[in-house]
Image (cartoon, rainbow, N blue to C red):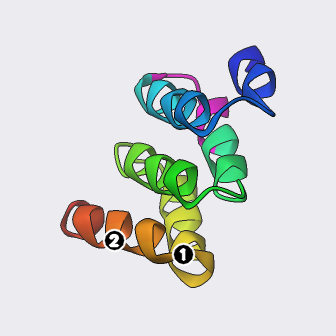
Amino acid sequence: FAIAAAAEGAPVSVRAEVARALGQAQAAEAIDQLGALLRDPSDTVRAAAVEALATKEEAKARSYLVRAWAGGGPRTRQAYLGVAPTI
């Protein structure tokens, strides 16, 4: 996705919006892009990626969510807890 690559170095709000947009994307590649956003330095972006991954039904998305819990900051974990009933 060119949008994810273009967002690198952009403000936090832009990167978080990219995560939300990827959550709406139907392409399978969106899951890997969201997984990459889980390594973003901003906990806000990582939380948006968690919320977006929770909308995906693929097992790969669930795997990324488990990793998000293990390596997330407070906002990421709060987002995870918010979506946990849906996964």
Side of 49 relative to 29 (left or right): left
Q: Which label was assigned to residue 23?
A: none
User: Which image quarter is the N terminus in?
Assistant: top right
Relative to 75, is 13 above or below?
Answer: above
Residue 30 in magenta stretch: yes
Q: Which residues are magenta?
A: 25-31
Residue 80 in magenta stretch: no
User: Which image quarter is the C terminus in?
Assistant: bottom left
Q: CA distance from mark 2 to mark 1?
A: 9 Å
Q: Amino acid at mark 2?
A: Gln
Specify the quadrant of the image occupied by residue 14. Answer: top right
* Mark 1, other Cα within 10 Å: few <14 / some 14–19 / many ≥20: some
Side of 31 relative to 79 (left or right): right
> Which percent across, then down, holds residue 49?
51, 48
Which residue matches tag 1? 73
> Which percent across, then down, holds residue 82?
24, 65
Side of 65 relative to 83 (left or right): right
Which residue shows up at 59% across the image and 42% down it? 31
Relative to 12, is 73 above or below?
Answer: below
Q: Amino acid at mark 1?
A: Gly
Of 1 and 12, which appears nearest the observer?
12
Residue 74 in sight from this viewpoint: yes
Specify the quadrant of the image occupied by residue 67. Answer: bottom right
Which residue matches tag 2? 78
